[in-house]
Amino acid sequence: MMHTRERIMSVRKKVIKKADKNKTAVLFVDETNDLQSQIAEYFLLKYYGDVYEVRSAGPKNDHVDCELISVMYQNGHDMRRSTSKDFSAKNMIEYDYIAFLQKDTYERIRDVIPFKGKHILKDFGKRSDFKATDDAELAECYIALAKKVEDWIKETFSSIEDLEKTVIR
């Protein structure tokens, strides 16, 4: 089994498709593409899908958080078709921006990520940061995270000028 760094480097050798030249291409990244990056992809497509070509992935993949999907659906956001992808997924393209949504993931892979693009860092934490003692509190944690991500998407991606202000590398 390949280690994460080896898997990331092997993706660099593959041919990556060109993005739609009429749209700005954005990749959202979290460790396993199961939470924050899925929410960000959903909301960017919802609000600005005509402007951005968007994907989400992680250095590893897992299952999209089932509780997230349920809570989002109960709140009017249908993410049931979301799938967790790693960097070797067949739908990867060349990106203009790579938005890292976990600081520790960014620090670990920023120099070896197999895609070129301007780096953005917005740390939304991890699922393990949730402080819930029952299902109702857990649902509230998901709702709060989704709202934070949604607000950030609306504010940051409303214009390329606003997006450029968030670039760190």
Image (cartoon, grey):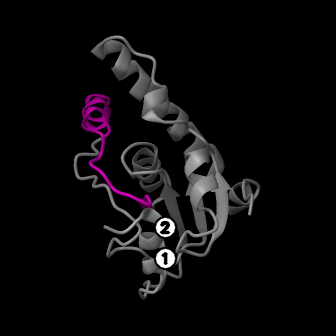
Q: Nearer the viewer, residue 152 or 51?
A: 152
Query: Is 159 positioned to the left or the right of 133 in the image?
Result: right
Label 2 close to label 1 by CB (< 8 Å): yes
Q: Nearer the viewer, residue 127 or 22?
A: 127
Q: Residue furthest top?
A: 133
Dividing the image into 4 quarters, which one contains the C terminus? bottom right
**Residue 159 in view in this figure:** no
Where residue 14 sits in the image (x, y, percent)?
41, 86
**Splitting the image into 4 quarters, where does residue 97 fall?**
bottom right
Query: Is 94 positioned to the left or the right of 10 in the image?
Result: right
> Which residues are the magenta region?
55-77
Asked if residue 26 lies in the magenta stretch, the reply is: no
User: Is the residue 145 above or below the residue 19 in the image?
Assistant: above
User: Is the residue 92 above or below the residue 41 in the image?
Assistant: below
Mark 2: secondary structure: helix
User: Is the residue 148 above or below the residue 92 in the image?
Assistant: above
Name the residue at 60% across, 75% down.
116
Name the residue at 60% across, 72% down.
96
Check disc 1 and report the residue beneath it. 9
Asked if residue 71 lies in the magenta stretch, the reply is: yes
Residue type pointed to by label 2: Arg
Q: Nearer the viewer, residue 67 or 110?
A: 110
Check disc 2 and report the residue beneath it. 5
Q: Nearer the viewer, residue 29 or 104?
A: 104
Residue type pointed to by label 1: Met
- Residue at mark 2 to residue at mark 1: CA–CA distance: 6 Å
Where residue 117 sits in the image (x, y, percent)?
62, 72
